[in-house]
Image: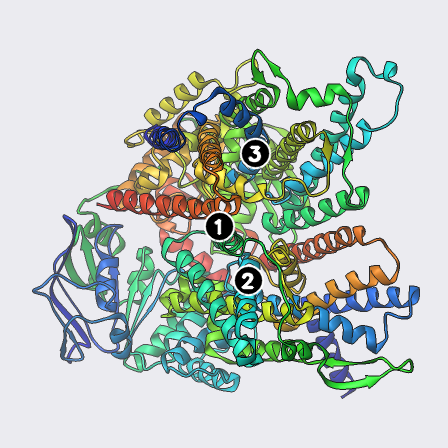
Amino acid sequence: MTIKTSNAGVTVIKKLFSRHETFVFLAIVIFGLIITVVNPDFLTLENVFDLLKSYALMGTFAVGMLFVLISGGIDISFTAIATITGYVIAVLLLQNGEQLNIVSVFAIAGGVGVLLGIINALIIYYFNIPSIITTIATLNIYYGLLTVISKGKWLYGFPAWFGQYTQMYVFKFTAANGTSYGLSVITAFWFVLMLIAWFVLRYTVLGRSIYAMGGNSASAKRAGFNLLRLNLFVYGFMGLMAGFGSVIQALLVQTVAPNSLVGKELDVVAAVVLGGASLTGGTGSVLGTFLGVVLIAIMGNGLTLMRVPAFWYKVVIGTVILISVGASAYRRKVSARRRTIIEVE
Amino acid sequence: MEPFLSLSNVSKHYAGVTALKQVDFEINPGEIHCLVGENGSGKSTLIKIISGTVHPDPGAEIKIAGEVVHGAQAIDAIHKGIQIIYQDLSLFPNLTVAENIALSQVVASRSHVVRWKTLDRIAREAMARIKVHLPLDALVGEISLAEQQLVAICRAFTSDVRLLIMDEPTASLTRKEVDALLSVVQEMQARDIATIFVSHKLDEVLRVADRVTVLRDGHKVGTYPSGELNDEKLTQLMTGKTVTYVPYTPPQSPETQEPVLEVRDLSKRGYFKNVSFQLYPGEIVGLTGLLGSGRTELALALFGVHQPDSGETLFKGRPVRFRSILEAMRNGLGYVPEDRLTQGLVMNQAVGKNITLTILDSLRNSAKLLDPRKVQESIQRWVKDLAIKVPSVESPVQTLSGGNQQRVVLAKWIATNPKVLILDGPTIGIDIAAKFAIHEIIRELAHRGLAILLISDEIPEVLQNTNRLLVMHKGYVAGEFVSSQTSVKDVQELIDHQDQ
Amino acid sequence: MERKYSEFLVLFFILLGVIGLMWLLNGSTFMSLNNFRSMAFQLPELGILSMAMMIAMLTSGINLSIIATANLAGIIMALILTQTIPPEATGPGGIGLVILAILAGLLVAAAIGLLNGFLIAHLEISPILATLGTMILVSGLALAITKGYVVSGFPPAMRAIGNSTILGLPVPILIFAAGAVILSVILQRTSLGARIYMLGSNPLACFYSGVNNPRVLMSTYLISGLYSGVAAIVMISRFNSAKADYGESYLLLTVLVSVLGGVSAAGGFGRVSGLILGLIILQIISNGLNLMGVNTFLTVALWGMVLIAVMVLQFLLNRYKEKRRSI
């Protein structure tokens, strides 16, 4: 009896350590401990809620990117898409802001984003152009045209109702010094998106088909999956998340600027990859992606709290990415070697 | 008995090329029917027509279960109970066994939500139908090839299958696994499910089939009960030629010479153990055994890919230990790998570039730059020497026929002027006529004084083209034969005996 | 034979067409000596960086870190160049210092190249990821070293590299030409070059043919790093300064130039001559649009469209060829 339970315990641990998420989680704990030792302000509810709010933007983009990476592609045009959708809603808010509400703003931004994402999907599917090249191109097309049309102007001065969501909380605490903090509705929105994404990826035929396509697209075609529809969904969904992200960005900073997002696309790819998704497709999870975003968030925040100059932020992120992908590449190599050994009596 | 499927007068023309001409074909419920023919004989077109992915020319009649079908689509074929297992299995390595088995069924049922319990149930039912057991939660990329094969079969069994078409199902299986597969096929036979086997391995064809249909150049040569056929007859039907083999004899008797390669007690944990043999100039020594017997692993160890743990390798009497392919190459060893398409050739690059890939450093001038004249001369020389038929040496290798592609691989290695050449399955997937030509080249090379180690699954092939034969089993050399005094049966019996 | 020359000819005719079009649209301002000189000063940076990208693409990889590498190498050079050392100790115009700075910069660029090579060749990390990581790391280092400031004020000998001419030809274009000749020789006339093409198409077959794949990849990314370092020399000498985020918009353009010049995105195909034609076409269009007063961002959008158009054209051409072959 005792042997049995300890065996079960061993397999659970083994299973845990075969998962990439475990390592990311451990990295988060270790970094968290170091930062807390240096500056106890890190591990306060106030700081944690603050971080979750300000990284909701990256987190939302990351959810979309996760789908694209699982399908075997990559999309770096989403920042340009988000810039366009941001402009569209900003212009609408400034012109007839009183007739809009938060739902219609999200719907409009999402709808435009889906359209732009679908353009990516059509190019990739019909002309068989690598997704990285396609989206490098569309990134420039979307961003270039937008900047020409918008003349690079910053837009601000949105209606008051639009500003209030920044200070809206699902639940709230009041600190000893009188400031209040809590779970922002923006964070909650990101969490809901992740829940939906998790459900879609794990419990729908659509989600499993995306994994299948990323694992082996030739087989997926033979097995009767509609690859065009899957591509449309994946890149359309990335566009949707880009649109939602642009609204979150507008809510957070109450300004829409043409150059606030473009250039950050690879940071999002890095977060999702840190979370265990591979660029060859077929792997990745919502939990891992969340942990990847959290890891990047606490590193950025931790460096500030430890009074490391902001210039070092990228150095740390770059190093962590290289160590992380290096370690998982090494693990893959070792397990592949183990598998090839055959049995000899 | 009424046939489950019958096709009559099926023809197919593609842009001026005749792929099939007035072929009739039928298969009864519960029958195991083999379809054989060389590459380009029309086998795959016939299968595509049966599965509904290709439409025959007008005038054809297709009946499934007595019903005439018109303009069948792939999905109709599935509804009528026809399933295909492709050679590459078409599985998803990143998904679980249960998902691989059940997912297409769930997609077909047009449901949107995946219930993992349902997936498990569908998978379990399919496994029960053919009496196999597989770990449902394991990722398909992490189970063995044989288990993957079973996953593909189980997937076919998630629907009510009446006819199962297997394209080269045993290509990557060990003997034991082939036996397991065949028992599954027999299980199916008992349930009145018809099976079409497409195979290159003639002995296997004869072992399992009730009837054999032979295609050649798009025509049907005939359908024969397998009892009426033997290996030789089948070859003749497929090629339209009678070929008689003269056993290979080395130009000089080996005993009068020094061995060029000698292996003493070579072992590598998990791969092979206590392997000893000698190879003399001018010899062709066969090396056979099941997949997984350690023969390819032994070859790779000789070639410097892995390092043996213990034992000695002597090359021209001198102890050697090759730490890389390059070192083995420089010492006069060549290795033609098993898989021509991915390991042997760079398919989309030019013939000339492929031939010179192994000898680039010797084509340089005193300034260490490639000398275009030397490069061209060398390419021309080997194209001529091996009679490679190619429109231009700048043509990509993928535009050549299988036989000519294999000549390019051989050319690449002969260009290095090797003393020992290891050929791993040099005729896999090549037409019989081209196969004979490759055998001729191998004999010619040995006659020039090269020592050749010929690795192959096909026992007849190794017996007919070698002077000695080594049989490997589970990492050991289980036996050695003089080829001219040995029959296929002798070798088969040794292997079967070891297997028990 | 056919394939190489037909693609080159197509590019050549496009080039003639583009020149004709720009002449028509801009008249004598386009065809003036001055205009060509200004193009000749702008083109080399992008050209050298494109070669750094091209060689990685030939092995079916990509190098996202080229701009970051160029910037860090440039900053290292700039830091040495702005040291206050008595002028008499450094030769006329500070030549001694300039040589030292350039060597140090190239060393840094080579080290980054080797790091990329190590990650890709030995750890088998996909090139996009590996070079993405080094890009973030290296640009972070550049930022951390300079704290975001511009490092400027070089000795005359350094400024001369970017702004003077020899026999009427700007020095940068001479450096570019030398780089192009060297890369062309490496690719067409050395065993390394032949192996790079073959490895780009099928690394496994190369392995079984005795090619030391890790070494080929290490050399590839080393060369890619070195070319980024050379681009840094041209870049900082022209601006008389170095900064952590110069030339960030070049990354897309280097991919565009390579693809336009016939480098296959899947690896294994592409020549320096094609790349140069692609580069000139791009430079002429951009110059012509600039003369016409077209918004630079519209040009950016146009590059995206050209990139897609070229890829679509390649796709259609391949499909046509395959169809012909199968008949």
x and y percentages locating residue B390 in the rendered image: 29, 32
Disc 2 chain ID: A
Disc 3 chain ID: C
Residue C46 is labelled as 3
**Mark whose residue sits in front, 1 or 2:** 1
- Rounded to the nearest angstrom, the CA distance separating label 3 from label 2 is 30 Å
- Residue A31 occupies quadrant: bottom right
- Rounded to the nearest angstrom, the CA distance separating label 1 from label 2 is 18 Å
Seen as rendered, the residue at the extreme left is: B59
x and y percentages locating residue A267 in the rendered image: 66, 57
Q: Is residue B393 above or below residue A55?
A: above
Secondary structure category for the residue under label 1:
helix
Residue A137 is labelled as 1
Secondary structure category for the residue under label 2:
helix
Residue marked by disc 2: A69
What is the crowding at mark 2: few (fewer than 14 residues within 10 Å), some, or many (at least 20)? many
Please give left or right for residue B314 compared with residue C149 in the image: left
Label 3 is placed on what type of residue?
Leu
Label 2 is placed on what type of residue?
Leu
